């Protein structure tokens, strides 16, 4: 968490902005921004997007490791692992940190018995099975994919995944929509399904990023108003 706060502070200082000026541009309180910069508060997906949008920096430059944004090579130890505590899936973020990139590249690790309901998001989606077995569901039609099998779909088509109770899967993903936007839409779809099952519209959860030195909260969802200090608590 500390290195992300430092990057936000450095970006703010490069523009000669005070915390108050950044606050006025991103809509978050100065006290919350101060805590983020000092590594004492986690970032929700809404807050991360708001801060990076105000500073005009790619979110990946905050989330990813200490490599240069201009680097064309991402070493294995520079690829953060992204976890959602409410989900058993982990993602290895392979994308570069340069501005205006068009794709996000991830490796998703799905445990046995996993199910992701059908949902949609922007852009296109490509998947290549590295290990194990993944059942792809597109518009209600299922297809079992094994190692070296791939799929490529317009992501506006309803699609989901599942693994067998005996075997998980590792899948290389390429998305033409930025990961934060994709994650937000997919989590919203899951929240709607969960709300129908539970009779509640409250959404709870966080994404954590592991740079090799421990997990860090990066993106979250809460029952309070988006972007408010309460939602970050």
Image: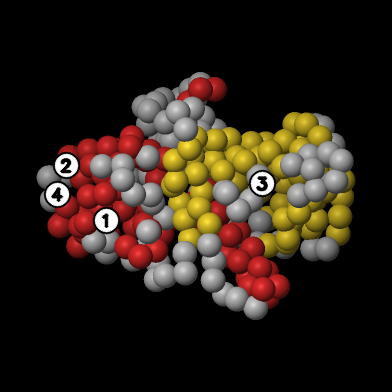
Residue 17 image offset from top left, x and y in percent:
14, 49
Label 4 crowd (10 A; few <14 / some 14-19 / many >=20):
some
Decide if residue 99 is on the left or right side of residue 199: left
Give me the C-alpha separation between circle 3 and circle 2: 38 Å
Q: Secondary structure at mark 2?
A: helix
Looking at the picture, the colour scheme in use is secondary structure
Give me the C-alpha separation between circle 3 and circle 1: 30 Å
The residue nearer to you, when weighing 85 against 30, is 85
Residues under numbered marks 4 and 2 in contact, where contact means CB atoms less than 8 Å apart: yes
The residue nearer to you, when weighing 226 against 99, is 226
Q: Which mark is residue 13?
A: 2
Q: Nearer the viewer, mark 3 or mark 2?
A: 3
Q: Which residue, given by chain and number where applicable, does mark 1 sit on?
A: 32
Give me the C-alpha separation between circle 4 and circle 2: 6 Å
Q: In the figure, residue 156 lies in which quadrant?
A: bottom right
**Mark 1 vs mark 4: which is more N-terminal?**
4
Q: Which residue, given by chain and number where applicable, does mark 4 sit on?
A: 17
Decide if residue 70 is on the left or right side of residue 136: left
Residue 151 image offset from top left, x and y in percent:
76, 44
**Mark 4 vs mark 3: which is more N-terminal?**
4
In this picture, is 140 found above or below 142?
below
């Amino acid at each position: 968490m500390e290195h992300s706060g430092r990057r936000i502070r450095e970006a703010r200082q490069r523009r000669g902005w005070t915390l108050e000026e950044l606050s006025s541009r991103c809509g978050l309180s100065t006290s919350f921004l101060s805590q983020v910069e000092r590594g004492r508060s986690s970032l929700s997906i809404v807050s991360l997007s708001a801060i990076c949008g105000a500073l005009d920096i790619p979110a990946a430059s905050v989330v990813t490791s200490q490599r240069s944004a201009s680097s064309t090579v991402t070493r294995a130890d520079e690829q953060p692992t992204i976890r959602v505590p409410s989900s058993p899936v982990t993602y290895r973020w392979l994308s570069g940190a340069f501005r205006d990139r068009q794709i996000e590249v991830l490796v998703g690790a799905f445990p046995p018995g996993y199910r992701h309901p059908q949902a949609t998001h922007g852009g296109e989606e490509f998947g290549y099975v590295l290990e194990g077995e993944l059942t792809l569901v597109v518009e209600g039609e299922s297809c079992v994919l094994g190692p070296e099998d791939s799929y490529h779909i317009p992501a506006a088509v309803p699609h989901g995944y599942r693994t067998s109770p005996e075997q998980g899967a590792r899948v290389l993903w390429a998305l033409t929509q930025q990961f934060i936007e994709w994650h937000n839409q997919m989590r919203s779809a899951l929240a709607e399904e969960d709300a129908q099952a539970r009779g509640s519209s409250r959404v709870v959860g966080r994404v954590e990023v592991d740079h090799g030195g421990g997990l860090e909260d990066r993106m979250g969802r809460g029952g309070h108003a988006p972007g408010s200090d309460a939602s970050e608590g």
